[in-house]
Structures are given as C-alpha cells and as structure tokens.
Amino acid sequence: MTEKNALGRVLVIMKEAYSAIREDALTLNVCALLDSLSAALSHAGNEKEPLSKLLGALKREIKAKNKFFYPKVRLFFKRVYAPPDFDYEKALKHVPAIIFGNDMICRKLMTGEADRAKSMCDAMKSYPGFLMGEFAALSDAQFYDLVFGYYPKLYDEPFMEKMKGLFD
C-alpha cells in the first residue's frame, strides 16, 4: 500500500469520526479515537515509520477502544477499498492543522464543553473532503472563511486561527 493510499484512508476515517462525534454516535473514548488518528497522521510522510505500516495498529486500536465506531470504518481498512484521489502534497501540508484541530476538540471535551467540541467537529468534518477535492470550487482562503470562520463568531474564541497561514 502506498503512503498516498494510507493517508487517503485515514482522512476518510477522520471524516467518519467527526460526523459520529457530531451526531452523538460516539460517547466513549472520543479523545482516545482522535488521539489515535492524530498519532497515525503524525507518521504521514515519515520514511522511517510510514503511515502505511501503521494502519494495522490503527485498526486494532479502533477495534479495541471504539467497538461501536469500528463497524462504520471497517471497509476503509480492507485492501479492496480505494480512497478517492487527492493532492497528496497538499494533504501532507495540512496534517499539522488536523492534529491541532483534534487537540482543540479533545481540550473542549475534557473541560466539559461538549457543544463547543461538536461545533468544532462540524467544521473539521469538512476538512478531509476539502483535501480530497470536494470543495474544488472554493479557494483555500474561501474554504477557511466558510468552514472555520463561523466558530469565533459563535463562541468569541479562536479555533483554527493559528493554522490560517496554510490556507493563504
């Protein structure tokens, strides 16, 4: 499996995770799931420990810690699944922002601010789609303003402002 294929699979799993969190389909181990996905993403582009070699470990971790979520993403771990085509270099560039977003969501969940965490998930669920070309009609800056720009207006606090430079 190529690194591009592995990254595409993780991005699709992330999209499912954000949607499940937003819909209250996941109530247990949400932070563990996001941490597992962030840990896997941190290996994207790493030649010594490539993401493609860690998908099995990610699968086992999701299966063990998120039994109710695993059936939703089981297909994405199968060899027959072909993730959508996407710009691998652009996705690699945005990996730190996804990890940052996951950390922010976990912080909100840990402080009991579930509504804010769900709002963040609502924005983050569009991010993998953006990286896979679903928002091709929008420029990077337009996507940022549309998807991440509303959170500070709702809650009067920053969310992805530190990562805005990736969208210029």
Image (tube, rainbow, N blue to C red):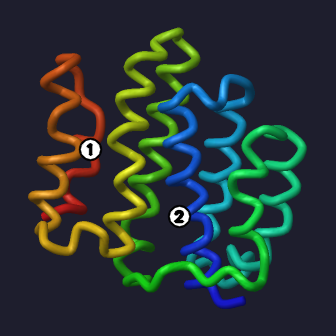
**Residue name at image x 61 percent, y 84 percent:** 82
Q: Position of residue 93 (x, y in %)?
A: 37, 71
* Between discs 2 and 1, the one toward the N terminus: 2
**Residue name at image x 72 percent, y 79 percent:** 52
> Is 54 located above or below residue 120 in the figure?
below
Closer to us: 23 or 33: 23
Q: Nearer the viewer, mark 2 or mark 1?
A: 2
Q: Which mark is residue 154?
A: none
- Residue kind at label 1, given as amino acid type: Lys
Q: Residues within 10 Å of mark 1 (few under 14, many from 20)?
A: few
> Is 117 located above or below residue 146 in the figure?
above
| Outermost residue to the top | 112
Closer to us: 93 or 25: 25
Element on which disc 1 rests: helix
Q: Residues within 10 Å of mark 2 (few under 14, many from 20)?
A: many
- Residue at mark 1: 162
Residue 9 relative to residue 28: left or right: left
**Residue name at image x 13 percent, y 24 percent:** 153
Q: Position of residue 56 (x, y in %)?
A: 84, 68
For the image, the number of numbered tags is 2
Screen quadrant of the N terminus: bottom right
- Residue at mark 2: 11
Element on which disc 2 rests: helix
Closer to us: 165 or 2: 2
Q: Position of residue 27 (x, y in %)?
A: 67, 23
- The quadrant in which residue 141 appears is bottom left
Separation of marks 2 and 1 at Cα, in angstroms: 21 Å
Screen quadrant of the C terminus: bottom left
- Residue kind at label 2, given as amino acid type: Leu
